[in-house]
Image: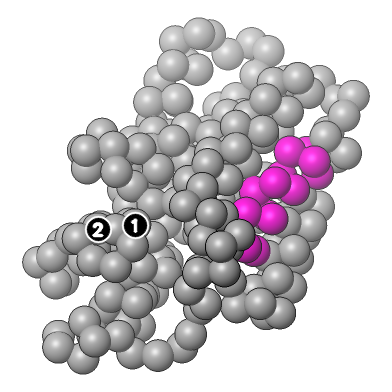
């Protein structure tokens, strides 16, 4: 496996590349370029797809999706190409998520990582993606709580990683990065979890926001 022969310098360079890719936040870039505004100054203050939609409506949602999906795809592909195997993909996926959630150019205030992590799952392993995406879709359709589906998907990531990759070369490191990714996404939703427990969490609705109506 290439991950066994790659030099430390290669790992460090790719970690930096993965982080910088993650810093390209779709919601922040789209709000600043097209609306001359910062999505983080509205609603929940989160730089994610849900807050972007609630603030500006659906007109440029595809731009946000494209940026956050593309960077995750590129990061995972680079990990597979230069480091090889699942470890390289999980490694690059982790640093991409780190950059997305804690982007240095944006004051370390980024998104919650749902769209990017969801894309990562599809690129990492279809079996891992099937379980997490399945849980996400079922819970969102049943409850309309995006945060509930997101947390469930994040919690299931290390579980499915354990089941799929147990006994494979580099498994302890694969498990570590899978757990870190799932843990970061869950931690980012700590306020949502509290609101869910209190019964005050907002449900997702397909409506045009006041912000979009004014644009």
Point out the image quarter for the N terminus. top right
Q: Earlier in the sequence, mark 1 or mark 2?
A: 2
- Say whether marks 1 and 2 touch (CB < 8 Å): yes
Query: How many tags in the picture?
Result: 2
Q: Residue at x 75, y 63 (%)?
A: 135
Quadrant the C terminus occupies:
bottom left
Q: Quadrant of residue 146?
A: bottom right
Name the secondary structure under disc 2: helix
Which residues fall within the magenta stretch?
147-161
Q: How crowded is mark 1: few (under 14 residues within 10 Å), some or many (20 or more)?
A: many
Q: Name the residue under label 1.
A: 46
Answer few, some or many: residues within 10 Å of disc 2's Cα (few below 14, many 20 plus, some between 14 and 19).
many
| Looking at the image, residue 116 lies above or below residue 133 | above
Q: Position of residue 18 (x, y in %)?
A: 43, 34
Which residue is the site of mark 2?
40
User: What colour-coding does the image apply?
Assistant: one colour
Q: Is residue 38 above or below residue 62?
A: above
Q: 24 above or below 34? A: above
Nearest to the observer: residue 67 or residue 153: 153
């Amino acid at each position: 496996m290439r991950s066994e022969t790659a030099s430390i310098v290669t790992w460090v360079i790719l970690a930096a590349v993965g982080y910088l890719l993650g810093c390209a936040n779709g919601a922040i870039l789209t709000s600043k370029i097209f609306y001359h505004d910062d999505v983080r100054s509205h609603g929940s203050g989160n730089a994610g797809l849900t807050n972007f939609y609630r603030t500006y409506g659906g007109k440029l949602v595809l731009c946000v999706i494209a940026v956050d999906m593309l960077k995750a795809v590129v990061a995972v592909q680079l990990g597979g190409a230069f480091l090889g195997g699942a470890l390289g993909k999980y490694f690059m996926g982790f640093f991409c998520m780190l950059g997305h959630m804690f982007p240095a150019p944006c004051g370390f205030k980024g998104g919650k990582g749902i769209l990017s992590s969801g894309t990562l799952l599809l690129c990492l392993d279809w079996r891992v993606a099937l379980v997490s995406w399945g849980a996400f879709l079922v819970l969102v359709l049943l409850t309309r709580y995006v945060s509930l589906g997101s947390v469930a998907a994040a919690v299931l990531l290390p579980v499915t990683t354990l089941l799929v990759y147990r006994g494979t070369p580099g498994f302890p490191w694969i498990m570590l990065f899978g757990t870190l990714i799932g843990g970061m996404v869950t931690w980012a939703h700590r306020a949502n979890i509290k609101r869910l427990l209190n019964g005050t969490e907002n449900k997702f609705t397909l409506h045009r926001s006041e912000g979009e109506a004014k644009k």
